[in-house]
Amino acid sequence: MLELAAALQRSLLPQLPSQLPGVEIAYRYLPSNDVIQVGGDWFDAIMLPGKRIGLVVGDVMGHGVASAMMMGQLRTAVQTLAVLGLPPHELLRHLDEAARRLSDTHLATCLYAVYDPVSRRCTLANAGHLPPVLARPGEPGRILDIPTGVPIGVGGHAFDAVEFDIDDGETLVLFTDGLVETSKRDFSDGLEILRAALPLPRVPLEDACDTVIEALDTAPRGDDAALLMARFRSIPAANVARWSLEPAPRAAGQARRLVRRALARWDLGHLSPVAELLVTELVGNSIRFASRPIGLRLLHTDTLTCEVHDDSHTLPVPRTPHELSENGRGLSIIGSLSHRWGTNRTDTGKIVWFELEPGLPAAERPPGQ
């Protein structure tokens, strides 16, 4: 049973890519030396619409199989809520409701952050977790002063969010208490050791992760520990294009011309026929419902992302179009031709978006492709 608990916990932890648009990722999970103490620490990095990055670290209180299972359920819940585009404080509120439906005996701490590489802003909300540390190259880490909040599962409490600017090269360090607190020191001393270990040069983040682990020297461990480090870099302004369109019939034609010019500037003209078709569908749908100007934004990163913003809260719903029906075909076309697509509500309306993989222009493709 003890080996089962340890295997279960390991299977529920993610294997994260080292690079995502706008962020470099490194992480460590350190299991307890005592398998009886297998716990519920978890972490994640989640790609969100608009190339934003969701970062999460959490810790289910208690040990054993039940805690490991609860950890897996909460991690899945965070992933599901995150892709809906919820801001951090709202995500924690929904997570708290989900936790109380799942169990009336388990509590958990959780810290959730969202980084936007276009605006260079990071938003965090905290549910009873230790604060993160922000490190600039060559400077000691800075413990962020954010509202702590109550643990997940308590219920009946709101969560606050804080927002701040992030400079390129800064690193956000998220961790669980097992990393900084041991039988030999309390968490405040561990936080100071962590902070002092972070005037890091511009070395690979994997090396920085090892430096932090060595400085804290948690062996032997009576509790498991998780460390997640994210080094940020923004999307250059030259790779972002945005416009405002009046919700009138001519907006679809304007959108096609604007997209065509932007793709030519980025040497992505081979994507123009598909991108123009899909943006016509999105803008045409917005014209039907919007009462204020429609926002159009393109992002050129590892993919081409197109977003259409309007002030209607009515989300388009995919339908199976009947053979003779003229309705319901737009989202089918978008789903067939795009790499990914989705919809998200905002405070002022909604965003509908799609992504295309750049690939190579036909003239540059190898023969037979």
Image: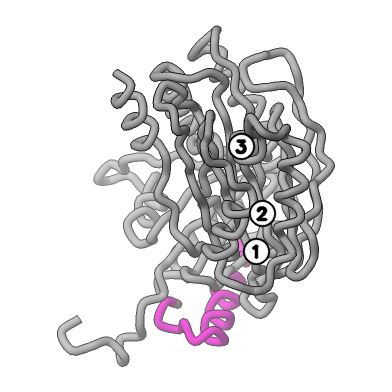
In contact (CB < 8 Å): disc 3 and disc 1: no
In this orientation, does residue 197 appear?
A: yes
Residue 346 in the image: above or below residue 195: above
- Residue marked by disc 2: 115
- Residue marked by disc 3: 176
Residue 324 in the image: above or below residue 336: above
Quick one: quadrant of the C terminus?
A: bottom left
Of mark 1 and mark 2, the one earlier in the sequence is: 2
State the SS at label 2: strand
Q: Amino acid at mark 3?
A: Thr
Neighbour class for label 2 at 10 Å: few (<14), some, many (≥20)? many
Q: Amino acid at mark 2?
A: Tyr
State the SS at label 1: strand
Residue 212 in the image: above or below residue 107: below
- Provide residue 238's location: percent of width, then percent of height: 66, 80
- Provide residue 96's location: percent of width, then percent of height: 62, 21
* Residue depicted at 39% across the width and 61% down the height: 338
Q: Amino acid at mark 1?
A: Phe
* Residue depicted at 75% across the width and 28% down the height: 159
State the SS at label 3: loop
In contact (CB < 8 Å): disc 1 and disc 2: yes
- Provide residue 188's location: percent of width, then percent of height: 78, 37
What distance separates the C-alpha of mark 2 from that of mark 3?
20 Å
Instruction: Please tell me whether residue 265 belongs to the stretch shown in magenta.
Output: yes
* Residue depicted at 54% across the width and 50% down the height: 48
- Residues shaded magenta: 249-271
Residue furthest to the right:
145
Residue 232 marker: 1
- Provide residue 106's location: percent of width, then percent of height: 55, 14
